[in-house]
């Protein structure tokens, strides 16, 4: 189950070299070697995905943890990942799964239909492809998503957005919502800290916003001394307003020392609050703070009348002033997103569940 013939690649020459076309790294891979993400391998001149049907970290999370704040608040998502990543972030917050060469061997077998059945059994509204980036294992994610959609289960991708044009359309066609990282509006930052270029991520953001019906939210992880200056934040939110508009939710989240940036301190809460004020001042209407305790920045307020719409305290979610039709109960302004009638009481607490070979 763990190896299938991959898609999005072509042969380079008669010596067995192949080139991966899945992401903008366009890795050239010799026989026996793996691409940068570590899960796509040249076997006898064919590209194979080595982690198809292998997964780690099956957990039921509140959708707010992705984070998605305007997509069926308080719903639960069966979340999982595999191994590998196509970015080389020095600050990776999930380095234990994206960087560890042992993860693939320690993963459990879980066929696509078993994952969907587990989501149904645990009353999950959606499946989230997360923890490590789903783009390197797009074939696996798309197949799970296809079966999930047939059973009425929604699909959520938490991704860095670093995907090439040929695969982008099919990948996002399988998804209902996505949170895409925008780490900085700086090509230098991306090259120095993640080993890639910025432009393909901006292309993905614009593609999802302009060409699909996928619900989009964006996360910016603020790292002290790297991308947290007022000027850098203003550049990012100016591009955001100009290209994605004022109604795409933006999440500023706190960095925790990890991987190769253990000597960098955690992001102070005041940095995130300042970033939120800058973004609101630039015209964004739905701006949040994350990974800190912030009753104001973590809750949803009507930007027109100030009405508290959805209160969040940790994973507790309470619908306060949001009407069933997705409008503010105060001024009746429309709140962008996907909402359902009925009161929200609380989101679920994250907890692991057995799936497939983990049963």
Image (cartoon, rainbow, N blue to C red):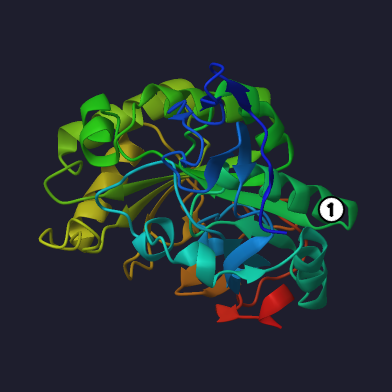
Give the image location of residue 87, x and y in percent. Answer: 38, 41
Considering only vertical position in the picture, is 239 above or below 93? above
The residue shown at (56%, 31%) is: 22
The residue shown at (78%, 61%) is: 341
Give the image location of residue 67, x and y in percent. Answer: 50, 57
Considering only vertical position in the picture, is 59 above or below 154? below
Q: Identify the image quadrant of residue 68.
A: bottom right
Name the element at disc 1: helix
The residue shown at (59%, 21%) is: 11
Considering only vertical position in the picture, is 137 above or below 356? above
The residue shown at (46%, 52%) is: 84
Give the image location of residue 218, x and y in percent. Answer: 46, 43
| Residue that extends furthest to the front in the rendered view of this protein | 15
Label 1: how many Cα within 10 Å (few below 14, some 14–19, many 20+): some
Query: Is residue 305 something one can see in this rendering?
Result: yes
Query: Is residue 210 something one can see in this rendering?
Result: no
Seen in the image, is 100 located left or right of residue 227?
A: right
Which residue is nearer to you in this view: 148 or 297? 148
Q: Which residue is mark 1?
A: 147
Give the image location of residue 10, x and y in percent. Answer: 61, 22
Seen in the image, is 303 located left or right of residue 119?
A: left
């Amino acid at each position: 189950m763990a190896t299938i013939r991959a898609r999005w690649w072509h042969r380079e020459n008669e010596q067995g070299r192949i080139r991966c076309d899945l992401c903008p790294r366009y890795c050239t891979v010799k026989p026996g070697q793996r691409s940068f993400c570590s899960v796509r391998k040249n076997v006898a001149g064919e590209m194979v995905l080595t982690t198809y049907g292998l997964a780690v970290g099956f957990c039921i999370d509140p959708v707010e943890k992705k984070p998605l704040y305007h997509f069926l608040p308080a719903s639960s998502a069966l979340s999982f990942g595999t191994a590998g990543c196509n970015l080389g972030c020095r600050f990776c917050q999930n380095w234990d799964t994206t960087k560890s060469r042992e993860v693939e061997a320690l993963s459990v077998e879980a066929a696509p239909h078993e994952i969907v059945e587990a989501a149904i059994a645990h009353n999950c509204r959606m499946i989230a492809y997360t923890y490590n980036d789903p783009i390197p294992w797009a074939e696996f994610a798309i197949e799970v998503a296809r079966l999930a959609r047939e059973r009425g289960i929604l699909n959520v991708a938490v991704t860095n957005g670093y995907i090439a044009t040929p695969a982008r359309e099919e990948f996002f066609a399988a998804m209902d919502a996505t949170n895409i990282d925008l780490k900085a509006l700086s090509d230098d930052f991306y090259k120095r800290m993640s080993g890639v270029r910025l432009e393909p991520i901006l292309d993905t953001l614009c593609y999802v916003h302009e060409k699909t019906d996928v619900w989009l939210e964006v996360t910016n992880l603020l790292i002290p001394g790297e991308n947290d200056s007022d000027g850098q934040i203003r550049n990012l939110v100016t591009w955001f307003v100009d290209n994605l508009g004022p109604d795409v939710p933006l999440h500023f989240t706190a960095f925790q020392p990890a991987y190769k940036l253990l000597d960098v301190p955690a992001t102070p809460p005041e940095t995130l609050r300042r970033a939120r004020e800058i973004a609101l001042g630039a015209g964004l209407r739905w701006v949040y703070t994350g990974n800190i305790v912030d009753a104001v920045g973590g809750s949803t307020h009507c930007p027109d009348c100030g009405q508290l719409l959805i209160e969040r305290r940790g994973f507790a979610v309470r619908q306060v002033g949001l009407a069933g039709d997705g409008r503010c109960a105060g001024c009746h302004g429309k709140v962008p997103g996907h909402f359902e009638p009925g009161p929200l009481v609380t989101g679920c607490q994250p907890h692991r569940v057995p799936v497939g070979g983990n049963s």
